[in-house]
Image (spheres, helix red, strand yellow):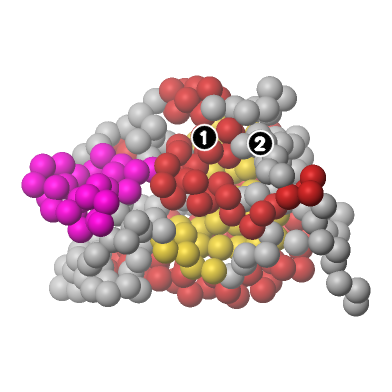
Amino acid sequence: MPKLPHPTPEALRRDPLPLRGRTALVTGASRRGGIGHAVARRLAAYGASVYLHHHVPHDAAMPWGADRPEAVTASVRDALGDPDATVLAGPGDLTDPAAPAELHARATEALGGRLDILVANHALSGSDGDLDTIDAAMLDAHWAVDARSVLLLVQAHARHRAALPPHTPGGRVMMMTSGQDIAGGMPGEIAYALQKGALASITRSLATTLAGYAVTVNTVNPGPVDTDYLTGDAYDAVAALFPAGRWGMPDDPARLIAWLATDEADWITGQVIDSEGGFRR
């Protein structure tokens, strides 16, 4: 096989809209304070059309409360880099086994019949505990949302990309994990850590499977990110564990995820990437 030629000088110069013409589904984009919102804004700013998934009842039950989906959508729309791109949104309860495929199909249709980028950002918060506290209901709840629904979304994405012409560019899957494999683990969130660990473990297998459809698969561990879930002395104590003296902000992992969606990251797949700002456990 002949070697690929060196990139031309023109090819080396960065496109200000590297995702122009691409389409993306971002799950768990329910709040302007969350990572999903930040990822969606970055993708939109890079030129992509974006479909935002939200599940307001989950946030409404959490201490931080729910946001307005129309306000989240408007914020992402304000970031659009390509005037021909669009931002759309819709709900989905991913505890339903049928919901992932239905969501993928709805987003694909809304974005013109082709979906390039899947960012599975959603997760279940709460309903967890330590080894002595967890029960079958907690384990099942986290399995359904944090692992099963993600795998079913990836399955839907693989089937969709398989039906496209061979080597259609831009196929991406990004999943989220939580550093459960790093020193100390997450002993107080056993159910959550179990399912996030499953995603980290399956990353390479999924990458191998989807390589035949020209889709890369990577998983990002963003470390502690300020999504409005902690305040006071506890917040300050976590900030002190970062060399920079501050928490990660939603746009910190968003920059990495958006870059992984570009053609510059075409040769990166099967990786679990820690993006924690040097967090010292």
Looking at the picture, how far across and down is residue 67, in whole percent? 35, 29
Q: Residues within 10 Å of mark 1 (few under 14, many from 20)?
A: many
Is 120 colored magenta in this rendering? no
**Quarter containing the C terminus:** bottom left
Residue 212 seen in the current view: yes
In this rendering, position of residue 43 left or right of residue 61:
right
In the picture of the structure, the residue carrying the numbered disc 2 is: 16
**Quarter containing the N terminus:** bottom right
Looking at the picture, how far across and down is residue 76, in whole percent? 51, 29
Looking at the picture, how far across and down is residue 142, in whole percent? 36, 60
Q: Residue at x 42, y 42 (%)?
A: 251
Where, by quadrant of the figure, is residue 86 drawn? top right
In the picture of the structure, the residue carrying the numbered disc 1 is: 41
> Does residue 80 lie above or below 9 as drawn?
above
Distance between the alpha carbons at the discs numbered 2 and 1: 15 Å
Q: Residue at x 71, y 36 (%)?
A: 20
User: In the rendered structure, which segment of residues is drawn in magenta?
Assistant: 226-250
Q: Residue at x 27, y 34 (%)?
A: 65
Residue 92 seen in the current view: no
